[in-house]
Image: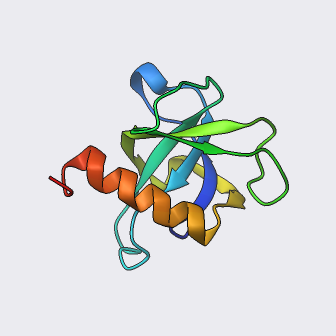
Amino acid sequence: MKRGDLITVAVSGDYGKPRPALVIQTDHLTEVDSVLVCLLTTTVRDAPLYRFPLPAGKETGLAKPSQVMVDKIAAVRRDRCGARIGKVDPASMLALNRLLAFVIGVAD
């Protein structure tokens, strides 16, 4: 699992159904037993400050157009993560980095 990978996860709570997620954790923390992800949804909202669109397709591995829910960051045990289904391109990761900085308050 590397930063920018799209994987399937199963998390507890309100967002508990198996769903795609974007790995946002640095690649330098391979020894920890969890990984930070942003969950994805196919419910599209007009919310450009905390939702980032991703297309369906071979590169992303997504069956339907989706949005990264930048405001839904979760720590998931690695053993609850599925295999890589796709990857986010570098330009999109740069835009996502900016949204993450805004959402978690680093940009304040």
Q: Is residue 105 left or right of residue 44?
A: left
Residue at the extreme top: 14
Task: Estimate the x, y position of residue 10 in percent, counting from the top left.
Answer: 54, 37
Residue at the extreme bottom: 28
Q: Is residue 45 left or right of residue 76?
A: right
Task: Estimate the x, y position of residue 46 in percent, counting from the top left.
Answer: 52, 26
Residue 47's place in the image compared with 1, above or below, is above
Residue located at (45% from left, 50% from top): 37
Q: Nearer the viewer, residue 20 or 96?
A: 96
Q: Nearer the viewer, residue 14 or 46?
A: 46
Quarter of the view holding residue 9: top right
Quarter of the view holding residue 92: bottom right
Please identify the quadrant where the N terminus is shown: bottom right
Residue located at (78% from left, 44% from top): 56
In the rendered image, is residue 24 in sight? no
Quarter of the view holding residue 88: bottom right
Residue 32's place in the image compared with 65, above or below, is below
